[in-house]
Image (spheres, helix red, strand yellow):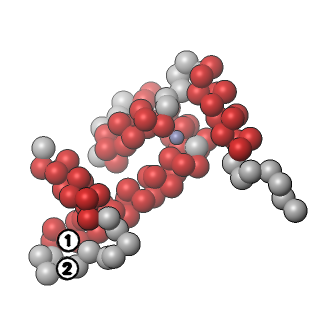
Amino acid sequence: MNAARPGGFRRRLKGYFLKRMRHMITCKEFEDFLISYLEDELPAKQRSIFEWHLGLCRECREYLAAYRRTMEIAEAVMSESGASIPEDVPEDLIKAILDARES
Ligand SMILES: [Zn+2]
């Protein structure tokens, strides 16, 4: 019954905003800011831009949630050497996070 592709309109709308709004960040920039945001290192202005994108962009909200969850798992893995990684978390993602933390 519902012929519309889910998210199609929203995506177009988002693209429109992203192009036109000077202070808007793209999803790629969002990813770049993510670690600083989580470490509470963003200046207030960038932080509000970041949170604005977060409110507008479902993909990035899901990305953030997945990232946070993975961080929790990574920390659990680091603190208990015997802990096993849940099967639904890709091993290279954990590795990438661990590498990023070391640098
Ligand atoms: Zn986004």
Q: Residue 6 vs residue 96: left or right?
A: right
Q: Residues within 10 Å of mark 2 (few under 14, many from 20)?
A: few
Q: Quadrant of the N terminus?
A: bottom right
Q: Nearer the viewer, residue 66 or 90?
A: 90
Whether residue 12 is visible: yes
Q: Which mark is residue 47?
A: none
Q: What residue do we see at 60% from left, 22% from top?
A: 19
Q: Position of residue 20 (x, y in %)?
A: 62, 20
Q: Nearer the viewer, residue 39 or 16?
A: 16
Q: Quadrant of residue 86?
A: bottom left
Q: Which mark is residue 83?
A: 2
> In what element is the residue under mark 2?
loop
- Choose the circle earlier in sequence order: 1 or 2: 1
Q: What residue do we see at 54% from left, 49% from top?
A: 59
Q: Residue 62 vs residue 5: left or right?
A: left
| Amino acid type of the residue that numbered disc 2 sits on in the rendered structure | Ala
Q: Are marks 1 and 2 in contact (CB under 8 Å)?
A: yes
Q: Which mark is residue 77?
A: 1
| Amino acid type of the residue that numbered disc 1 sits on in the rendered structure | Val
Q: Quadrant of residue 32?
A: top left
